[in-house]
Image (cartoon, rainbow, N blue to C red):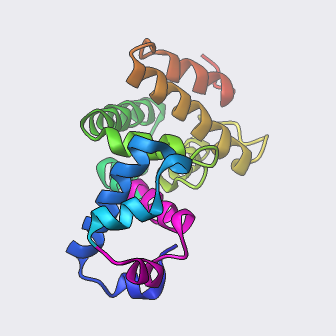
């Protein structure tokens, strides 16, 4: 994560540096992006860059965290539901908003994809949804909440990727989650 001096920059300066880096990582990939090219395009010196980040991996971690925050802002917090129907509606609405954001911001999409394999597993929105599903009795917590949350994040990630590619049918996410969660019909 960024070093303390980065946090002392103005919000505009931090956002500008992260935007340039996000563009580079999205275009060239995590491994292919050049730290030197990013800092040059961001208009900061190499000395300053090393006062803000330990290197390219540290910068990528900051970009990935910022991108995840942007996505979570689009989703908003998970609000507790009263029943299964409301959970499915809220999940479908969140998925629509997320897909819309990722279509409008392909750099965010590319950064999130490059952040795999851990992408989504620490997602508070998914964790709250799964916990809510267990609370209302929709989800069988037998396998363990951490495993269910990680598996749910993986299923949602694959379904979202398929939807962004135009290969998903829209109903597959619910079917997969019902099976994962041991939902009886």
Query: 14 or 38: which is nearer to us?
Result: 38
In the image, residue 47 lies in the stretch drawn in magenta: yes
From this view, report whether residue 70 is shown above or below residue 136: below
- Give the residue drawn at x 59%, y 34%: 138
Q: Which residues are magenta?
A: 44-68
Q: Quadrant of residue 86?
A: top left
Query: 24 or 175: which is nearer to us?
Result: 24
Q: What percent of the width, then of the height, locates residue 62?
A: 46, 66
Query: 65 or 71: which is nearer to us?
Result: 65
- Give the residue drawn at x 41%, y 17%: 170
In the image, residue 91 lies in the stretch drawn in magenta: no
Q: Main secondary structure of the magenta part?
A: helix
Q: Is residue 36 visible?
A: yes
Q: What percent of the width, then of the height, locates residue 184?
A: 64, 20
- Give the residue drawn at x 42%, y 35%: 91
Q: What percent of the width, then of the height, locates residue 42?
A: 29, 66
From this view, report whether residue 74 is shown above or below residue 58: above
Q: Is residue 126 visible?
A: no
Task: Identify the residue at the far right of this view.
Answer: 143
* Residue 117 horizontal side relative to residue 88, left or right: right
Q: What percent of the width, then of the height, locates residue 5?
A: 40, 88
* Residue 74 horizontal side relative to residue 133, left or right: left
Q: Quadrant of residue 133?
A: top right
Query: 58 or 148: which is nearer to us?
Result: 58
* Residue 113 horizontal side relative to residue 49, left or right: right
């Amino acid at each position: 994560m960024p070093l303390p001096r980065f946090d002392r920059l103005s919000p505009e300066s931090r956002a500008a540096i992260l935007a340039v880096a996000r563009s580079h990582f999205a275009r060239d990939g995590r491994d292919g992006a050049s730290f030197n090219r990013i800092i040059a395009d961001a208009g900061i010196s190499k000395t300053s860059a090393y006062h803000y980040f330990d290197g390219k991996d540290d910068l990528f971690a900051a970009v990935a965290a910022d991108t995840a925050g942007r996505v979570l802002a689009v989703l908003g917090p998970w609000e507790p539901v009263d029943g299964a129907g409301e959970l499915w509606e809220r999940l479908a609405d969140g998925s629509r908003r997320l897909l819309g954001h990722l279509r409008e911001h392909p750099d965010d999409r590319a950064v999130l994809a490059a952040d795999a394999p851990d992408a989504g597993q620490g997602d508070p929105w998914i964790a709250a949804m799964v916990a809510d599903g267990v609370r209302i009795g929709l989800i069988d917590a037998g396998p363990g909440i951490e495993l269910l949350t990680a598996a749910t994040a993986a299923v949602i990630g694959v379904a979202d990727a398929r939807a962004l590619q135009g290969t998903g049918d829209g109903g597959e996410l619910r079917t997969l989650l019902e099976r994962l969660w041991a939902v009886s019909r």
